[in-house]
Image (cartoon, rainbow, N blue to C red):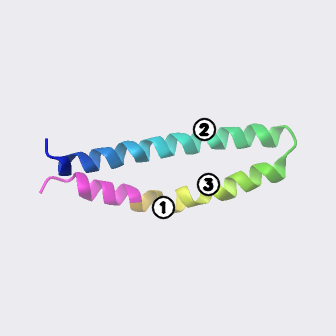
Amino acid sequence: MPNSDLLPSLLFKINENQLALEAAIMELSNWIEQRGSADVADNVRGCMEAIDRNEEFIKMTLAVLMTPD
């Protein structure tokens, strides 16, 4: 398999990892909020907004990269 064929698969796996980390961090922010630190939880969620903003673009780009020529 040529290296150029590996790139879309690598990016897909990195994106999967990113989304898994986002879910884990959101769970932690909920746990923090339940223990009375709503400000900290809100700050964490605010930082995670970039992942949400970029998710659709990443999905579309990966779909294009993974489409056979």
SS class, disc 1: helix
Q: CA distance from mark 3 to mark 2?
A: 11 Å
Find out whether the residues at labels 3 and 2 contact each other: C-beta distance under 8 Å: no
Left or right: 16 in relation to 64: right
Three-letter code, disc 1: Asn
* Residue range of the region highlighted in magenta in the rendering: 58-69
Left or right: 56 in relation to 24: left
The circle on residue 54 is 1
Q: CA distance from mark 1 to mark 2?
A: 18 Å
SS class, disc 2: helix
Q: Is residue 68 magenta?
A: yes
Quadrant for residue 10, please give it.
Answer: top left
Left or right: 59 in relation to 33: left
Quadrant for residue 21, please give it.
Answer: top right
Read off the residue under disc 2.
Answer: 24
Q: Horizontal and vertical percent for residue 37?
A: 85, 46
For image coordinates 41% across by 45% down, the residue present is 14
Read off the residue under disc 3.
Answer: 48
- Rate crowding at label 1 as few (under 14), some (14 to 19) or many (20 or more) other CA atoms within 10 Å: few
Specify which label sits upstream in the sequence, 1 or 2.
Answer: 2
Find out whether the residues at labels 1 and 3 contact each other: C-beta distance under 8 Å: no
Please identify the dominant SS of the magenta region. Answer: helix
Q: Horizontal and vertical percent for residue 55?
A: 46, 57
Three-letter code, disc 3: Met
Three-letter code, disc 2: Ala
Quadrant where the C terminus sits is: bottom left
